[in-house]
Image: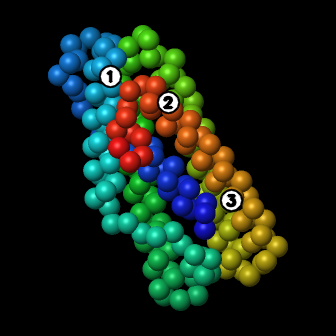
Amino acid sequence: MRLAAVAIAAAALVAGCGGGGADEGDTGSAAPSANAYATQGNTICRTTQTQVDALQTARPPTLEDLREKTPAARRRLRLWTEYSEAVDKIGKQSQDDLLALEPPDELTAQREQLRKDLAELDRLGKKANEVGNRLRAAARSGDDAALAKARADAQKLANRQGRIADRVGSDFSALGWSACLPGQ
């Protein structure tokens, strides 16, 4: 189920950026220097990555799991749902914390682009949840045509989410938030 993996990867990208904190280079002015702004954002990202790392991970559900025919499948689906919801909650807080930082004038345009890209990623995430529900319903009912349609829709959304997640990564780089990037 590539959609689930991409959705969590995108969520983790955003969630890899939560928490909060100021930097000693911040003079208390409304707009810190670019270095202080980068430090604040990187602190948020490191804090959130710690929060995400502390979660008990779960693997994405298989098609068989979505059919929920066994107690083990229902358990795997429940664990995945709990994990996904926890990552989403951390990611949302992280996003709020990052966007609450006041950028220096020279980074205002980049921060606004990040705001737009995160809003688009959130919108696609809601659509992905809807498609996921359709996928699950089709799997449980055994409707092969509905299942094929939901899988195709899920793949299209996953591709779009991946492109937006790449843009978010570019936004993070432009703002100096290297700790928000995967593998940092």
Q: Residue furthest right?
A: 145
What amino acid is at disc 1? Tyr
- Residue receiving disc 3: 154
Q: Residue at x 56, y 35 (%)?
A: 167
Dot 3: element: helix
Crowdedness near tag 2: few (<14), some (14–19) or many (≥20) residues, C-alpha within 10 Å: many
Crowdedness near tag 1: few (<14), some (14–19) or many (≥20) residues, C-alpha within 10 Å: many
* Distance between the alpha carbons at the discs numbered 3 and 1: 37 Å
Asked whether residue 18 appears in the rendered view, the answer is no
Which callout, 3 or 2, points at the residue further toward the start of the chain? 3
Q: How is the image coloured?
A: rainbow
- Compared to residue 125, the image places residue 118 above or below, namely above
- Residue receiving disc 1: 37
Residue 41: x percent and y percent?
Answer: 33, 31
Q: Is residue 6 left or right of residue 104?
A: right
Q: Is residue 29 left or right of residue 94?
A: left
Q: Residue furthest front?
A: 183
Residues tagged 3 and 1 counted as in contact (Cβ below 8 A): no
What amino acid is at disc 2? Asp
Residue 163 got which mark? Answer: none
Residues tagged 3 and 2 counted as in contact (Cβ below 8 A): no
Residue 15: x percent and y percent?
Answer: 41, 46
- Compared to residue 75, the image places residue 95 above or below, namely above
What amino acid is at disc 3? Ala
Which callout, 3 or 1, points at the residue further toward the start of the chain? 1
- Residue receiving disc 2: 171
Which callout, 2 or 1, points at the residue further toward the start of the chain? 1
